Every structure is written in structure tokens, then in C-alpha cells.
Amino acid sequence: MSNEKKTIKDLQQEIKTWADQVYPDRTPYSALSKMVMEEIPELLNGGQDDPGEWADLLILVLDAAGLRDIDAVQAAWDKMEINKQRSWEVDPETGIMHHI
């Protein structure tokens, strides 16, 4: 099957199969720690135009969620419905947006 016909659920399963082979003892905590301590800094420090750096984040999120039996895609759809109902503002000191 070509990548165009695969779903994000297929991707999540492929990530799980691969990660189970290379790092069977991983935990959601270890996957998220790698994301926070290694991958996000790489993205922020010059990797924002590198699709591979964005892919690293997606892979780790899908793996960590899958380890908790969470359908990350459905959770994102559900959360977007909540976000649409909220009011948002940008903190003038940090430039970070948050709901109020």
C-alpha cells in the first residue's frame, strides 16, 4: 500500500511495531522526555524548516499516546471542538497564546 492511502492510525501502528523492536522497554514518559529534552530543542534551534524534525515530534507523540492506548487523532478532533469554544489571548510578555 502506498503512503498516500495509509491513515494516521496506520502510521501509529507502524511506529509501534518499529519502536517495539528497537526500544521495547520504552514508556510514555521516556518518549515524551526525549521529545522535550532533545527533539523540541532541535526544532527550536534551527530545525523549523526541516520536515524530519517535525516528523520526530509526531512520531514521539503518536508512540507515547499509543502506549497509553489513546487515539491521538480522535483526541485532537475532540480537543479542537473544545478550543473553538474558548476565548484566546496572547501574553504580551511571552508572546504565547493561551485560553482565558
Image: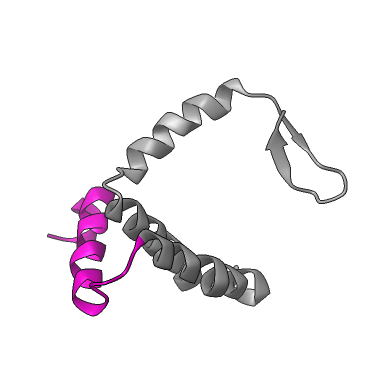
Is residue 87 placed above or below 16 in the rendered structure? Answer: above
Residue plotted at (49% across, 32% down): 80
Side of 98 where 68 appears, left or right: left
Visible in this render: residue 54? no
Q: Left or right of 56: which side holds 10?
A: left
Residue 96 spot, x, y in % from top left: 74, 47
Q: Does the magenta stretch include residue 10?
A: yes
- State the residue in front, 46 or 70: 70
Q: How many numbered circles does the render carry?
A: 0
Q: As displayed, is residue 69 above or below residue 98?
A: below
Q: Which residue is drawn at 87% across and 44% down?
A: 92
- Where does residue 94 sit, x and y in percent of width and height? 81, 51
Image quadrant containing the C terminus? top right
Q: Which residue is drawn at 28% across and 55% down?
A: 67
From this viewpoint, is residue 65 visible?
yes
Q: Which residue lies furthest to the right in this view?
A: 93
Which range of residues does the magenta coloring cover?
1-27
Q: Is residue 14 left or right of residue 61?
A: left
Residue 83 in which image quadrant? top right
List x then y, in percent, for residue 30: 41, 68
Instruction: Name, please, the residue furthest toward the top.
Output: 85
**Does the segment drawn in magenta span residue 11?**
yes
Specify the quadrant that holds the N terminus.
bottom left
For the view shown, which residue lies furthest in the bottom direction? 22
Residue 29 x, y percent position in the rendering: 42, 62
Q: Which residue is located at x 25 percent, y 71 percent?
A: 19
**Which of the colour schemes (rainbow, by chain, secondary structure, one colour) is used?**
one colour
Q: In this view, does 83 lie above or below 69?
A: above
Please identify the quarter of the rendering in which residue 26 is found. Answer: bottom left
Of 24 and 2, nearer the camera is 24
Q: Is residue 25 shown above or below 91? A: below
